[in-house]
Image (cartoon, helix red, strand yellow):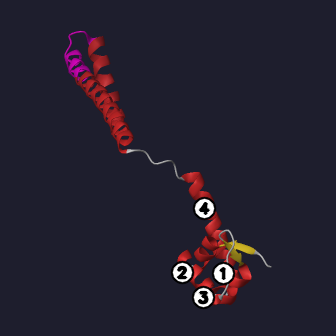
Amino acid sequence: MGQRISIAKAAKLLGIDRHELCDRLGHAGFESFEGAVDLDDVKSISPKFNMDDVRLSERTRLIRQTARRRQAVSPPRKKEFELQDDLDKMHNKWLMERKKAQEYSMLFDALIDELGHWQASPDPHKSKFAIEFSHWICDQLDE
């Protein structure tokens, strides 16, 4: 008795459905035990196994890598209500950030208006500061 391989894995390597592989094995007179079959039996009914062992081993390696990746990467799926909760939380956070941005925008507009008043001030120090600060703000916005 040679190396054993699961029927599901052998079918995957061959690129066929496992039920089809079971039918082929049954018609050829080969039996499986506990979902596994002798690798030599599979090779004897499938030209794909006999033609290119290098390609088969590469395909086996890719299947193993993909299986490991799926286990590590795929998070559990969330239910619809959990997704809706997440969406509501994100929406509420966005609304808070939008409100904060609007408040900053109104504060900035008020600062610009006040600087305009200071520029027209009879106090030369206040006027000079307002003009220099306005130039600095314009330079920052141009960058």
Query: Circle 2 sits on which residue?
Result: 20
Mark 4 Cα within 10 Å, few/some/many (few <14, many 20+)? Answer: few
Left or right: 94 in relation to 47: left
Magenta stretch mostly in which secondary structure? helix
Percent x, y of residue 85: 35, 36
How far is the residue under mark 3 from the one under mark 2?
11 Å
Which stretch appears magenta?
110-124
Q: Which residue of the protein is positioned furthest toward the top in this rendering?
A: 123
Identify residue type, mark 4: Ala
Helix, strand or loop at label 1? It is helix
Q: Which residue is mark 4?
A: 67
Check disc 2 and give the amino acid type: Glu
Residue at image position (64%, 89%) is 28
Marks 1 and 2, Cα distance to the nearest angstrom?
22 Å
Q: Nearer the viewer, residue 100 or 77?
A: 77
Q: Secondary structure at mark 4?
A: helix
- The residue at which mark 1 appears reads as 55
Residue 136 in the image: state x and y as whole percent: 35, 28
Q: Quadrant of residue 14?
A: bottom right
Q: Which residue carries the number 3 mark?
A: 27
- Percent of width and height locating residue 41: 70, 84
For the residues labelled 1 and 2, say whether their Cβ atoms are less than 8 Å apart. no
